[in-house]
């Protein structure tokens, strides 16, 4: 990676006089600051709010609404991570900015359950203020010290202003009509980075200017995945504390815990380290950061959150007393596992690896297991899903060992 010490040498005539950029190379210059971890606490609350939406409202429209709101939450967090990849969170102006974002983020998160109801503006206004405010602050912070990237953030501000208009407009219309403008806003946010934030007269961003600190970005995304897994633990613990203890509920509790452990193993034991090493070794890591650490993790996080919801539903009714496993619960159990496996496969592929046959095959198998809902209980289906995840891990380990053995033979 390019040594970022060359950045921040001056060049712009406007902007913040104090230099608040990260400098130097190595671990110390890329470490995650305590204020960043403090900032993440808001998102523990946000992820909990999202999961509770689906626990209390079991219908397809709520699922779509949750997907849109989850995208907004993730986009807000990852955009902030990009900024703190370049700005030093230990500097007072940056730290102050993060604290303001925390306050606005807490207001936004509190509105999530009623975002498509009476609290639309309480969700949309803080969200837009965070996105635009952080972007304009970054323009000002970089203006004198990194004018080239300050221009990039001017382009980003234009895109955020357009999408922000749709977020606010959606909050002003009736709840039934709100979904369309908010989907448009989310799609604009998705399209911005892929179009290199092209703006008339300014043109597109040159991705070679995205001098990303790979170690910092990888650690931040991994920490968000830990947040999501932690929320899964919270949901499981809360649900178990509210049910009568029996052999069945204990087995459901164990199934929920095992699913969380298996998801942790799939990413952190089998994917994360190799991907981080690949990312950190790139001479121009900007596009890797955009794809692998901006878009793809959303699939992993969605898989974790949906699994948490499925685990609670199974805990509340492990034997399906109203008959076979209902389609909603079965769809969440199987769909969440499949989404997580596909997300892992994409993450590996976009970080220099090959397509993982075990992950893709496992995703297909767990989706096919949905058909078992007519003959098995929710608890049994949850354990079937766990067995598929475990089989993927075992298959992945065996393939890795076989590949290593072949490489050793060739080297000898």
Image (cartoon, rainbow, N blue to C red):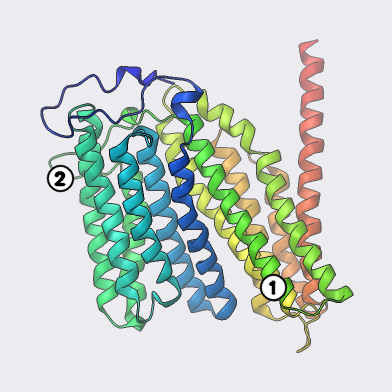
Q: Quadrant of residue 229?
A: bottom right
Mark 2–mark 1 Cα distance, whole angstroms, equals 52 Å
- The residue that appears at 79% across and 87% down in the rendered structure is 321
- Checking the image for residue 63, the label placed there is none
Residue at the limit of the structure toward the top, as seen here: 412
* Residue 407, position as x, y percentages in the image: 76, 20
* Residue 353 vertical placement versus 364 (above, below): above
- The residue that appears at 73% across and 61% down in the rendered structure is 366
Q: Which residue is mark 2?
A: 200
- The residue that appears at 34% across and 54% down in the rendered structure is 189
Front in this rendered view, residue 145 or 163: 145
- Checking the image for residue 239, the label placed there is 1
Asked whether the viewer can see residue 50, the reply is yes
Tell me the mark number nearer the camera, choosing from 2 and 1. Answer: 1
Q: Describe the element under mark 1 as helix, strand or loop.
A: helix
Instruction: Name the quadrant of the C terminus.
Output: top right
* Residue 8, position as x, y percentages in the image: 26, 23
Q: Describe the element under mark 2 as helix, strand or loop.
A: loop
Asked whether the viewer can see residue 333, the reply is no
Q: Quadrant of residue 29?
A: top left
Q: Are marks 2 and 1 in contact (CB under 8 Å)?
A: no
* Residue 307, position as x, y percentages in the image: 65, 63
């Amino acid at each position: 990676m390019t040594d970022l010490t060359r950045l921040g040498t001056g060049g712009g005539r406007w902007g913040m006089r104090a230099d608040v950029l990260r400098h130097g190379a190595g671990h110390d210059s890329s470490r995650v600051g305590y204020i960043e971890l403090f900032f993440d606490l808001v998102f523990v609350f946000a992820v909990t709010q999202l999961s509770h939406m689906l626990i209390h409202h079991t219908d397809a429209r709520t699922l779509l609404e949750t997907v849109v709101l989850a995208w907004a939450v993730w986009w807000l967090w990852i955009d902030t991570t990009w900024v703190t990849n370049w700005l030093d969170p230990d500097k007072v102006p940056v730290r102050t900015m993060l604290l303001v974002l925390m306050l606005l983020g807490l207001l936004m998160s509190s509105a999530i359950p009623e975002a498509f109801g009476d609290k639309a503006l309480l969700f949309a206004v803080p969200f837009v203020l965070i996105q635009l405010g952080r972007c304009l602050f970054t323009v000002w912070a970089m203006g004198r010290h990194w004018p080239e990237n300050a221009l990039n953030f001017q382009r980003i501000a234009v895109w955020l202003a357009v999408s922000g208009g749709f977020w606010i407009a959606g909050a002003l219309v009736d709840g039934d009509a709100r979904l369309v403008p908010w989907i448009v806003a989310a799609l604009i946010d998705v399209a911005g980075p892929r179009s290199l934030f092209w703006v008339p007269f300014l043109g597109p961003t040159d991705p070679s200017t995205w001098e990303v600190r790979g170690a910092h970005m990888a650690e931040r995304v991994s920490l968000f995945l830990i947040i999501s897994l932690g929320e899964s633990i919270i949901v499981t613990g809360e649900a178990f504390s509210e049910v009568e203890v029996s052999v069945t509920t204990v087995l459901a509790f164990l199934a929920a815990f095992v699913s969380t452990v298996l998801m942790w193993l799939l990413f952190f034991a089998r994917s994360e380290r190799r991907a981080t090493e690949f990312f950190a070794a790139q001479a121009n890591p900007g596009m890797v950061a955009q794809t692998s650490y901006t878009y793809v993790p959303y699939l992993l996080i969605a898989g974790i959150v949906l699994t948490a919801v499925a685990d609670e539903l199974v805990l509340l009714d492990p034997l399906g007393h109203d008959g076979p496993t209902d389609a909603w619960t079965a769809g969440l159990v199987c769909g969440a596992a499949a989404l997580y496996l596909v997300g892992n496969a994409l993450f590996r592929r976009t970080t220099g690896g090959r397509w993982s046959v075990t992950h893709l095959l496992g995703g297909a198998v767990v989706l096919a297991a949905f058909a078992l809902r007519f003959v098995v209980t929710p608890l049994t289906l949850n354990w079937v899903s766990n067995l598929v995840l475990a089989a993927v891990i075992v298959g992945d380990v065996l393939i890795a060992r076989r590949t290593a053995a072949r490489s050793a033979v060739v080297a000898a």
